[in-house]
Structure formats: C-alpha cells, structure tokens
Amino acid sequence: MKKYFENDEILAVLWRWKKPLAVVFALSLAGSAIFSSPMFIKPKFKSFARVYPTNLKKYSEESPTEQMIQMLESDAIRDTLCSRFKLDTLYDIDVDEPYYKDLLYKEYSDHVQFKKTKFESVEIEVLSTSPQVAFDMVKSIINLYNTQVKSLQDEKLVEAVGTVKKMLEQKKVEMNLLESKLNVLRREFGILDYGSQVKNLSKEYYKLLARSNVDPNKIAKVKVELDNLKLKGVEYENLSGRLWSVRNSYNNFKLKYEEHVKELNRKKEYAMKIVNPYKADKKTYPVRWLIVLVSVAIAMSGALGVISFLDRFERKKIT
C-alpha cells in the first residue's frame, strides 16, 4: 500500500511539472537530431575484408595470423596509405601542425583496424567519410601487404641467387681449367680413354712381340703409346675424376639457381580473401537513433533530478 502511494506521489509530481518536462523532451529531441545530422557530424562508411595468411615463411614463434597483423601494422603500409590517399587532408590535419605526425597516426589508428578472428583469419576494417575511399583503402592494404611480404621474402632469395651464381661461376672456371689440361694430354700424348687404351695397347704390344716377322717400327710406335700412358695416365685419370666431380657440383648448383630464380619470378598471393571488400551504400557512423535516445535519456534524467529538488524545496517553503 505504501508503494502504491509513493508511485502515486511520483506521478503527481510529474503531472505538476509536465510542461517543463515536455519542453526538455522536445528540446533534447530536436537538439540531438540536429547535432547528429551530417551538417555537424560527417557520416562515415565502413568497408572491410577478411583474409587468411598463406605462403608465409616462419620467422619466429608467432602464428601466421599474428605475423600477418604485424605486417599489416607496419609503418611502410601506413605511410604509403597516408600519402596515397592524402589522409591528412581527409582528416582535416594541417601540415604545419606542431604534432602533425602524432595527430595523423592517431586518426589513422582510429579509422583503420586489424582484428584477429576466432577462425585465425584477419579482418581489415576501414572507416571513411567516402565509401569509395574506404573501399579503395581496403584493397590497397591487401595489395601492399602482398608486395611487402614478397619484398621481404625476395631479399633472402636474391641473396641465395647471388651466392649460387658465384658458385656456378667458380665451378665453370674450374671446369674450363680442367678441360684445358685434359685437352693438352689428349692432343700431346694421345690419351682419350686411359682404361680401355691400356688394355687394348697392352694386348696389341704382346701380340706383336710374339710374332717373328713384325715391323720393328710398328712395335716401337705401340711402345711409345704405352709409355705415354704410363707417363701421363695417372694424371689424366686424376684430372678426369676431378672434372666429373666439378661438373656434378656445377649441375647441382645450376638446378638450385634455376629453382631460386623461378621462385623469385613467381607471382604469389600471401593473403587469401575469404570476404571480399565492397563499397558501402549505408553509413556506419553516427548511429543517429542511438545518439538521440541517449541524449534524450540524459536530458530527461537531469530534468527529473532538478524537478525533484525544486518540488521538495517548494514543499518545505509551504510547510
């Protein structure tokens, strides 16, 4: 019963002050509607994309998603976007401002967000007063990320290509030198295939010796060839073995070189798009109905507090 009378008393107070409350309600409603309009608050449009990291090399204990976010937050991507889209002008920041960079980067971080999703993908979100700019920025971020990752990975590949190329050149010089030495032995001593030549000449020599009516000059000629083999045969075999080994190394380095160059020239994507960005046709900020609702609620709460105080004050004066 007591609660009923208390409620009745509150209603009575509200009724007595209905006109001031109505004025406060109307003014707060109109004021919040006007001040939340595009005339005072520029509407902002959101464009976003969800991407998944791919083809990344492991540099640390970070997950591929964490590596991706680190790269997306790099100053190279941020500064390129600030320059390409003239974000200082877009954010109304004067170049002559004493804290120009701080203000620009603060606005950038407020308008460009990178979030890790529960499915290990990354959400790229951009807010802008222009839906086209927001859309273009998301696309540019993805393209810049791909370029940046490729550049970092290519640094190692370029280094590897340079190292392997030097080894190829060294092996080529070594091969040419060995070939030159072997050519001298072939030309001056007639050594072409040491193993088979020794075997065949030895047979021929002993056959000639076993015959009685053989031309001595023929025997002498075979003897000279055998002596040449004895004199330079071991050297020829050593050079041939080294040449085979060097040629094998050269071929292996050549395969590595071709693989590295192919990898260097290969076009790869490092961000697999799960949700493609699109140009928003509806503003995201401000939410006018929410601003109006909160403003009216605050105004009415304040008005009720004032009315409660004034009503008690008047009652005390009467008593």
Image: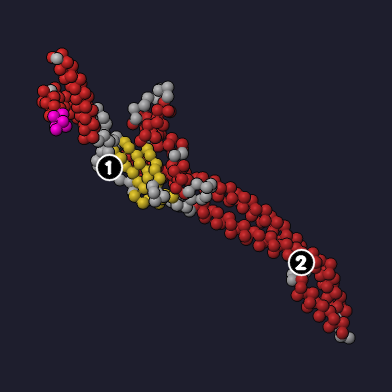
**As rendered, which of 237 and 155 lies closer to the eye?**
155
Q: Please tell me whether residue 70 is drawn above or below residue 39 in the rendered image.
A: below
Q: Nearer the viewer, mark 2 or mark 1?
A: 1
User: Under tag 1, what secondary structure?
Assistant: loop
User: Under tag 2, what secondary structure?
Assistant: helix
| Range drawn in magenta | 1-7
**As rendered, which of 236 and 138 lies closer to the eye?**
138
Say whether residue 125 is magenta.
Answer: no
The numbered dot on residue 296 is none
The numbered dot on residue 280 is 1
The chosen color scheme is: secondary structure
What residue lies at 33% left-to-right and 44% top-to-bottom?
48
Q: Position of residue 283 (x, y in %)?
A: 25, 38
Q: Position of residue 315 (x, y in %)?
A: 15, 17
Given the current orientation, which residue lies at the most extreme bottom position?
A: 212
Magenta stretch prevailing secondary structure: helix
Q: Which residue is mark 2?
A: 237
Amino acid type, residue under disc 1 in the picture: Ala
